């Protein structure tokens, strides 16, 4: 099937790939200017006792991230010295300007000036592995190694629609969309990448309210850090993006949050840590060491007593580049939606470790693939299980967890979290994706 995710259709804002990345000068702790994970510091994590047999094949890996709160595990693994602790003393973390640039740099790989792995929208490794979004549609095999977080995204709308007081039900927008159409305009919704998590959350929310995202609105692609500026210039009416950009919009009084995505699907899977399959296959011990560091960072990020420090680290210009005030409250579960609605101490906060947040359930990846079948990004006859089994390496996660004494964190059912239920009572049984697709009223497939 020829891909409808043609590279020409992407809205790229970075120009050349090399111009779209900024090398982050992280260190083992603090915010000084060392570029690697091996800088010494009195606060660095003590080195683990690694046997010669377990020593990583290489001590470096080039990783990427986008300026979002859920990039925290990779940044904290660098800043708190967890990479160095497990022998990966020369890891670099590189800020990318858009998910398209992440794709481009993963396609290149570090040997050609790109990156080896990244904080990533979970569907991207599947698109890359099948050649849907790569040069010449040539597959670039990728592995998903960990889920980085659950929840913590949002759908926000312009103050122009404040009177609608939108929440989980998007149907009040139908009349406004019709008005715009009558005036020769399309209601514009911004997402961060075609077929990515934010695209899927936006589409699900609209379709659940009877709005067809294929025909009733224009869906445009905007990099996460540019969402608020584009709302300010009124180039879009609504957007879906990860934090802190929804809270940033509210704090600047430019719009309000209709829903935090946990209200759409509680404890939904979100970003992943993914690496090129060839790098992992060549460096299995180094991969395990990276994973041990990332899992330890995820545990650190999820401790309430570390939230303040995490947000201060993320706020730096070389990372998220947003005030701590825009990051901290929603990280603690306190949501001011900007229209009088609030959630306090909510369990819909972004989770990095608790409640199996870090575990890469294959059943969740099956939903992402199935939802992209719904919208025509994958063929209807895609063998969902075979594709997920090829990309999802939960076995590596399990080995890393056991190596750091977290064997109890491996779920009893290592492949599935079971049947999932969305806010509109629609259910997804990973054992029967077709039944889910058949139940949906609005779809392209």
Image (spheres, rainbow, N blue to C red):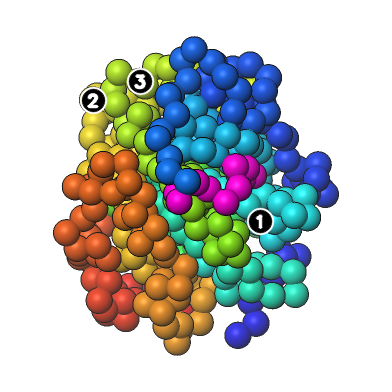
Mark nearer the N terminus (1 vs 3): 1
Whole-angstrom CA distance, mark 1 to mark 2, is 38 Å
Q: Residues within 10 Å of mark 1 (few under 14, many from 20)?
A: many
Magenta stretch, main secondary structure, is loop
* Above or below, comparing residue 142 to residue 248 in the picture: below
**Residue placed under numbered mark 1 in the picture:** 106
Q: Nearer the viewer, residue 177 or 316?
A: 316
Per the image, label 1 sits on a secondary structure element best described as helix
Q: Magenta segment, which residues?
A: 53-63
Residue 197 lies, with reference to residue 316, above or below; the image says below
Of the image marks 3 and 2, the number of the one nearer the N terminus: 3
Can the viewer see residue 129 in this picture?
yes
Separation of disc 1 and disc 3 at Cα? 31 Å
**Neighbour tally class for label 2: few under 14, some 14-19, many 20 plus, Cα within 10 Å:** few
Q: Quadrant of the N terminus?
A: bottom right
Q: Circle 3 is placed at which residue position?
A: 306
């Amino acid at each position: 099937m020829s891909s409808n995710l043609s590279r020409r259709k992407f809205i790229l804002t970075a120009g050349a790939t090399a111009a779209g990345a900024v090398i982050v000068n992280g260190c083992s702790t603090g915010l000084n200017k060392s570029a690697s994970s091996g800088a010494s510091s009195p606060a660095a994590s003590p080195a683990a006792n690694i046997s010669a047999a377990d020593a990583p094949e290489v001590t470096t890996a080039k990783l990427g991230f986008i300026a979002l709160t859920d990039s925290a595990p990779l940044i904290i693994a660098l800043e708190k010295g967890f990479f160095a602790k497990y022998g990966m003393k020369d890891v670099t973390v590189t800020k990318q300007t858009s998910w398209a640039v992440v794709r481009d740099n993963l396609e290149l790989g570090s040997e050609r000036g790109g990156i080896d792995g990244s904080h990533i929208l979970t569907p991207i490794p599947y698109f890359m592995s099948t050649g849907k979004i790569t040069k010449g549609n040539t597959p670039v095999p990728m592995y998903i190694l960990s889920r980085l977080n659950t929840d913590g995204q949002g759908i926000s709308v312009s103050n122009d629609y404040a009177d609608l007081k939108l929440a989980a039900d998007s149907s009040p927008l139908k009349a406004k969309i019709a008005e715009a159409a009558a005036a020769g305009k399309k209601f514009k919704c911004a997402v961060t990448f075609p077929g990515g998590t934010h695209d899927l959350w936006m589409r699900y929310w609209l379709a659940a309210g009877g709005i067809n995202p294929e025909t009733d609105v224009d869906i445009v692609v905007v990099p996460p850090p540019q969402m608020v500026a584009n709302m300010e210039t009124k180039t879009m009416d609504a957007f879906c993006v990860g934090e802190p950009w929804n809270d940033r919009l509210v704090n600047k009084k430019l719009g309000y949050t209709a829903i935090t995505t946990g209200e759409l699907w509680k404890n939904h899977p979100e970003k992943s840590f993914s690496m090129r399959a060839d790098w992992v296959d060549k460096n299995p011990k180094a991969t395990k060491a990276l994973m041990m560091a990332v899992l330890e960072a995820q545990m650190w990020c999820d401790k309430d007593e570390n939230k303040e420090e995490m947000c201060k680290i993320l706020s730096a210009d070389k990372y998220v580049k947003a005030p701590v005030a825009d990051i901290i409250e929603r990280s603690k579960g306190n949501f001011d939606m900007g229209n009088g609605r609030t959630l306090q101490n909510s369990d819909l906060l972004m989770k990095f470790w608790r409640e199996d947040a870090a575990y890469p359930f294959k059943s969740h990846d099956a939903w992402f693939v199935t939802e992209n079948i719904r919208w025509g990004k994958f063929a209807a006859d895609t063998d969902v299980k075979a594709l997920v089994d090829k990309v999802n390496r939960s076995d590596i996660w399990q080995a890393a967890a056991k190596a750091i004494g977290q064997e109890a964190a491996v779920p009893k059912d290592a492949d599935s979290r079971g049947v999932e239920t969305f806010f509109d009572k629609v259910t997804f049984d990973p054992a029967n994706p077709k039944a889910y697709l058949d139940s949906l009223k609005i779809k392209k497939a």
